[in-house]
Amino acid sequence: MTYSNPASDSLEISLEYLQQCDEKDPLADKRNAFILPENTLYLDGNSLGAMPKVAAERAQQVLSQQWPQDLIKSWNSHGWIDLPARVGEKIAPLIGAAAGQVISCDSTSVNLFKVLSSAMLLQSAGKTNRNVVLSQKGNFPTDLYMVEGLATLLGEQHCRLKLIEDSDNTHALEQALTDPELAAAVAVVMLTQVDFRSGRLLNMQRLTELAQANGIIVIWDLAHSAGALPVELDACNVDFAVGCGYKYLNGGPGAPAFIYAAKRHHQKLTQPLTGWMGHSAPFSFTSQYQKADGIAQFLTGTPAVLSMSVLDAALDVFSDVDMMLLRQKSLALSRYFHLLVQQHECLAQLRLLTPQQSAERGSQLAYQHKDAYAICQALIKHGVVADFRAPDILRLGFTPLYLRYSDIWHAAATLAKLVKTGEYLQPQYRVKHKVT
Ligand SMILES: *Cc1c(COP(=O)(O)O)cnc(C)c1O
């Protein structure tokens, strides 16, 4: 990764200006849909989304009525059995997917295993000798680990991971996708749309097009884009995607993830985790596996009803949200935050890793600093919740549904104060926690 210094931007940001932005903000009322702790500025919704009130109400319903009173009848009467499909259909419009292509289940890691296997099987059914899964070195580790696991299972000659060095542009990636010799061996390109460290946003349309023009199947990980910005899977002709329920979708800790598979592939797909919920008729209890027709073929076992009910309710917060407005606010929040950082001279040691071009960044900012961990802990102590990513990155997430513009001012002021006074150097802020 190379670090570029931010281009100058001369707009002077004041608290008054940000308060005016709040008054004009068409999404301002959405904050009332969430329960947020007092005296906390939450800049970590990219890691665990805040709790929508309707999510808490649904949890209460399931725990006080559905489970204890209605017991097993609830599979039908409360539609528990339809939760994976119903949740999938609520996520679909947020990621530009027409009906019947998204389903909620399992974790992102497990879902990656399923779509990776499906994509490799599609390639081998096409009698190609492609065995490479291409990805980026800085991709989220679990994504890469899942490829390694599949490679162990299938053997090197059928699956091997090749990583492209990350850089400030996607030149090396594009070259690998288009170089006649290199690309001919690539079965699948697996990319994360918004980089979890830097916040860099990849050009989905362009990379998908380049890959497919060379016979490569495309898998996108939307963990940091679903619910954070408009995604256009159908319009970009994407093959497969996976994503996360507990980040910008606010589904709660460990919420189920989701899978997208383009309809054109459904009939010829096979995925290896052939559990009964992916069967065409689970309750016929036949001994032969017969896959379900549509996107349901990606289901494996019984849905996690408690957590999926909560995710189902949480998604209703998005039902009337214009994703273009959400994106505008997200970009404005992060832009203003960085302008404030630049206005505080003492913060000059923080180096922005996130691209400043709006077309190239997601909904977070990442700053490199040798004491990023201690700074993050000190911020949390002062009520500004951010997170740390090893080895030296302070990460701040901007969630437009429940952050106010004026929050940005207070967060930047807190950061400046504890850096200026050197408070973050106190030993208490160096104590390492399991989760950072
Ligand atoms: C958060 C995240 C995951 C999480 O995977 P789980 O299996 O849900 O733990 C995967 N990939 C990326 C890119 C992520 O940001």
Image (cartoon, rainbow, N blue to C red):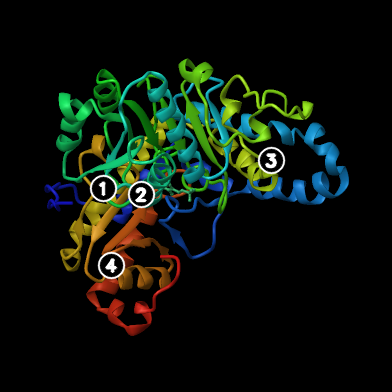
Q: Amino acid at mark 3?
A: Thr
Q: Amino acid at mark 1?
A: Lys
Q: Secondary structure at mark 3?
A: loop
Which residue position holds label 1?
Answer: 137
Residue 192 in view here: no
Q: CA distance from mark 3 to mark 1?
A: 34 Å
Q: Is mark 2 within 8 Å of ligand 1?
A: yes
The reply to whether the C-beta atoms of the residues labelled 2 and 3 are less than 8 Å apart is no
Query: Which badge, 4 or 2, comes first in the chain's sequence?
Result: 2
**Nearer to us: label 4 or label 2:** 2
Which residue position holds label 2?
Answer: 140
Query: From this viewpoint, which residue is outermost toward the right?
Result: 69
Q: How many marks?
A: 4
- For residue 352, what is the image quadrant? bottom left
Give the label on residue 302, or none: 3
Query: Which badge, 3 or 4, comes first in the chain's sequence?
Result: 3
Q: Amino acid at mark 2?
A: Phe
The local crowd at label 2, few if under 14, some if 14 to 19, many if 20 or more residues have their Cα within 10 Å, is some
The local crowd at label 3, few if under 14, some if 14 to 19, many if 20 or more residues have their Cα within 10 Å, is some
